[in-house]
Amino acid sequence: MKDPHALKLHAPKPPVVSVIIPTLNEESVLAATLQRARQPGVHEIIVVDGGSMDATRALAASRADRVVSAPCGRAAQMNAGAAYASGEILLFLHADTWLPEGFAAVVTAACAAAVGGRFDVQLEPSSLLLWLTGELINVRSRWSRIATGDQAIFIRRDVFEQLGGYADMPLMEDVDLSRRMKRAGRIACLRARVITSARRWQKNGVVRTILLMWTLRAAYFWGVSPERLRRVYANTR
C-alpha cells in the first residue's frame, strides 16, 4: 500500500500567477495598484516602465519584485514583462486598475478549463453614466469574448508563447490578442470585478470618450491601421 503522506508530498502544485504592469508616469496611482495586487497565489509582480519622468520607477522598485525598462508602448512593455516572468499564468494589469480579493485563486481555477480570460470592470469614482458604461463594457465583452486592457486580461503562459505574445502595434493590442485567444480555445469571462480609474472618461467627457472608443474599435474591425488609429486617438487627448 502506498504511503498517503508520500502522495501528498508529490501532489502537483497549483499554477502560479505573474502580474505584469506597464507604466509611464504613473506615480499617482501605482502604489495602490501594487498593494492590491500583492495577494496569496501571486508568484511575482513585474513593473515594465516605458521611460517615466516622475517617481514611478522608484516607487515600483520598493514594492514590485522586478522593475524593467522597455520601449514605450503597452504591447512592447507587456511582452518584455512576459519575457522576464516565470509564472505559469500571466496577468496584464493597467497601472490604475485594482484587482479583487482572491483574484489569483479565481484566475488559476479559470485557466484549468480555459486558455485565459478577463474580469468584469467597475469604473471609479462612479456616477450613473459611468456605472452604465462599465455595465455595457461587461455585456459587450461577455457576448464577444473580446476584452480591453482595463479588464485585466490573463492567459496561460504556454498559450501566450504559442500565439507569439502581443502584436507589435501602437493601439488595439488587447483586442488583437483577445481575437487570437478566442481561436486558441475557451475564454473565461469572470464576473468578479476589477476597479479601474475613470480619469480618462472624466478628463475627456464620458459620452465623448465612449463615442471615440466605439469609433476606433469599429474602424479597426473594418481594417483601418492601428498606426492611423493611434494618431486619431492622440489628437483627441
Image: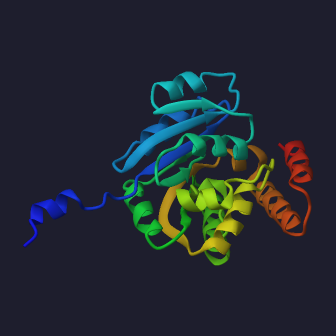
Q: Which residue is drawn at 55% across and 65% down?
A: 117
Q: Is residue 98 above or below residue 221?
A: above
Judged left or right of residue 69, residue 100 is left
Residue 202 location, x and y as percent?
70, 47
Figure quadrant of the N terminus: bottom left
Is any part of residue 127 visible from this angle?
no
Q: Which residue is drawn at 56% across and 36% down?
A: 47
Q: Residue at x 55, y 40 (%)?
A: 84
- Taking depth in this image into account, of 173 and 115 the one nearest to the observer is 115
Judged left or right of residue 47, residue 164 is right
Q: Residue at x 81, y 47 (%)?
A: 170
Q: In this view, does 100 lie above or below 183?
A: above
Is any part of residue 43 visible from this angle?
yes
Figure quadrant of the C terminus: top right
- Taking depth in this image into account, of 68 and 124 the one nearest to the observer is 68
Residue 228 location, x and y as percent?
92, 51
